[in-house]
């Protein structure tokens, strides 16, 4: 039986056979922990269709193909075409799209996959440099994807999952938790990659709330408002709101209506409190 792609020895052999090296410009770090990759795929709720961003040499893709009816993977590095054709040849349920995920017609692809296979999830080892734009595209444009499971830089993952009134809690936390239940599945040490990055990673799972009353435009407006509230963390929410609204009087009126003390800082406000503040505004 051929070793899984994510084993250190097979990854090393694949890279040598094709004369490859990890490209910093694409944020490439290849996974070399087979048990971690298998566990990630199994916990991704990927039994029907799953979208992957940045398959690399196929380490996670292979495990997703073992649990899903269909895998759609987006890759921008055309030097990997022959590699993936080889490493993933045992599987007939994988579609590689040679395109930047950030420019694809996401809505059309999700609709197509739902019609053919049922539910659609996302599971990916995200390059650090595109983590936030990828996630916010999914947050805002793919409301019918119930689960997003991603490997991200540990510091970023902890900000998404942070609880109110903690050091990591901020605009990213509020924006994610407005739409999802966010939890850390497990940590990923730097040694799980070839080459090893300078920081550890974490696998975060976003489970979409079943009820969402904001439409797309209102959601974007709310996110803009949240960023304004956290614009200067050391300032009170009153000071940030005054700067955002251009009026101290209006800021005080909104805070009073929402029942928020003007001396409060944004990091002390829960997602629900910030939502109420926005609705009062």
Image: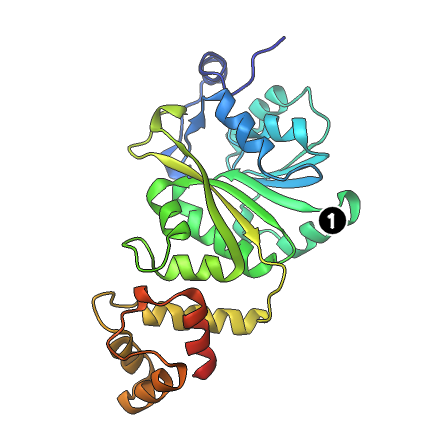
In the drawing, does residue 236 fall left or right of residue 87?
Answer: left
Question: Picture coordinates of residue 219 (x, y %)?
Answer: 52, 69
Q: Outermost residue, right direction?
A: 116
Q: Can residue 127 be seen by looking at this rendering? A: no
Q: Vertical placement of 132 versus 197: above or below?
A: below
Question: Picture coordinates of residue 275 (x, y %)?
Answer: 46, 72
Q: Vertical placement of 226 versus 162: above or below?
A: below
The quarter of the picture where the C terminus appears is: bottom left
Callout 1: SS: helix
Q: Residue at x 71, y 39 (%)?
A: 48
Q: Residue at x 73, y 34 (%)?
A: 69
Quadrant in the picture for residue 8: top left
Quadrant in the picture for residue 2: top right
Per the image, the residue denoted by label 1 is 114
Of the pair 89 and 226, the residue shown nearer to us: 226
The quarter of the picture where the N terminus appears is: top right
Q: Outermost residue, left direction?
A: 234
Of the pair 272 and 99, the residue shown nearer to us: 272
Q: Residue at x 22, y 71 (%)?
A: 235
Decide: few, some or many residues near mark 1? Use Cα within 10 Å; few <14, some 14-19, many ≥20.
some
In the drawing, does residue 49 fall left or right of residue 33?
Answer: right
In the drawing, does residue 204 fall left or right of residue 104?
Answer: left
In the drawing, does residue 200 fall left or right of residue 236?
Answer: right
Question: Picture coordinates of residue 13 (x, y %)?
Answer: 48, 12
Of the pair 29 and 97, the residue shown nearer to us: 29
Q: Residue at x 29, y 88 (%)?
A: 247
Q: Outermost residue, bottom direction?
A: 249
Of the pair 47 and 92, the residue shown nearer to us: 47
Question: Picture coordinates of residue 229 (x, y %)?
Answer: 33, 71
């Amino acid at each position: 039986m051929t070793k899984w792609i994510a084993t250190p020895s097979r990854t090393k052999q694949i890279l040598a056979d094709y004369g490859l090296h990890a490209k910093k410009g694409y944020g490439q770090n290849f996974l070399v922990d087979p048990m971690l990759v298998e566990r990630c795929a199994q916990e991704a709720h990927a039994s029907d269709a799953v979208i992957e961003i940045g398959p690399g040499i196929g380490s996670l893709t292979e495990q997703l193909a073992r649990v899903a009816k269909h895998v759609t993977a987006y890759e921008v590095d055309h030097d990997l075409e022959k590699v993936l054709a080889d490493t993933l040849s045992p599987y007939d349920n994988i579609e590689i799209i040679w395109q930047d995920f950030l420019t694809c017609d996401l809505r059309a692809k999700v609709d197509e996959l739902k019609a053919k296979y049922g539910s659609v999830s996302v599971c990916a080892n995200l390059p650090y440099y595109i983590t936030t734009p990828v996630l916010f595209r999914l947050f805002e444009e793919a409301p019918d994807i119930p689960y997003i499971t991603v490997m991200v830089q540990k510091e970023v993952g902890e900000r998404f999952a942070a609880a109110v009134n903690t050091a990591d809690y901020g605009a990213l936390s509020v924006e994610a938790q407005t739409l999802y239940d966010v939890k850390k599945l497990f940590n990923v040490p730097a040694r799980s990659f070839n080459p090893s990055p300078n920081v550890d990673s974490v696998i975060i799972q976003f489970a979409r709330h079943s009820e969402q009353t904001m439409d797309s435009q209102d959601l974007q407006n709310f996110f803009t408002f949240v960023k304004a509230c956290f614009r200067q963390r050391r300032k009170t929410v009153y000071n940030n709101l005054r700067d955002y609204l251009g009026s101290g009087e209006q800021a005080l009126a909104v805070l009073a209506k929402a029942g928020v003390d003007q001396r409060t800082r944004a990091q002390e406000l829960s997602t629900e409190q910030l939502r109420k503040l926005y609705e009062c505004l």
